Image: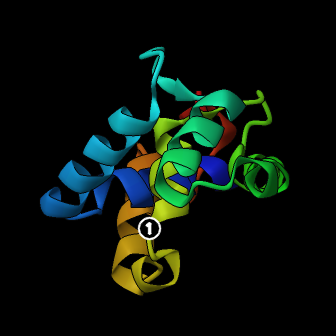
Amino acid sequence: MEYAIVNYITNFLTSAQNQKALRETFLKLDKDKDGVLSKSDLIDGFSNFYGNKVFLEAEIDKLLEDVDLNKNGVIDYSEFVTASSNFREMLTEVNLKEAFKQFDIDGDGHIEFEELK
């Protein structure tokens, strides 16, 4: 549930300008164009930017551990947006209420298990 709420807020309540910049960055890092960022994609991308591959491998491992929310070994676009966003600024009462409404399908003020399917 937490992952779904975070995903909704970061993907649907991010400005169009930020979404465009994030998408362009993601696509540049996704060297093999498979729609996810693997360890190899991240090492290559950061090495091109920082030029220190040995130092970065440990950092990439930590980044994958922290950002790969569904623990499938790669960073998908939603996880990338979540990690790249200033999430503290996005956690406003208005945004949280909007996310809640998206999951509270029947509008009764509660999220039942059936609404999550």
Identify residue type, mark 1.
Ser
Q: Residue furthest left?
A: 17
| Residue highlighted by disc 1 | 85
Residue 92: percent from the left, percent from the top?
42, 84
Q: Nearer the viewer, residue 47 or 96?
A: 47
Residue drawn where x is 85% and y is 53% of the image: 58
On screen, residue 3 versus residue 55, left or right, reads left
Residue 67 at what x, y percent from top left? 68, 52
Classify mark 1: residues with Cα within 10 Å, few (<14), some (14-19) or many (20+): some
The relative height of residue 77 versus residue 79 in the rendered view (above or below) is above
Most foreground residue, 12 or 63: 63
Colouring convention used in this rendered image of the protein = rainbow
Is 112 situated left or right of 85 in this image?
A: right
Q: Nearer the viewer, residue 53 or 17?
A: 53
The C terminus - image quarter:
top right
**SS under mark 1:** loop
Left or right of 45: which side holds 1?
right
Where in the figure is residue 61, as x and y percent of width and height?
82, 47
| Residue 63 coordinates in the image, percent (x, y) | 73, 54
Question: Which residue appears farthest toward the front when viewing the image?
Answer: 51
For image coordinates 43% across by 51% down, the residue present is: 8
Question: Is residue 93 shown above or below 43?
Answer: below
Residue visible at 45% across and 76% down in the picture = 86
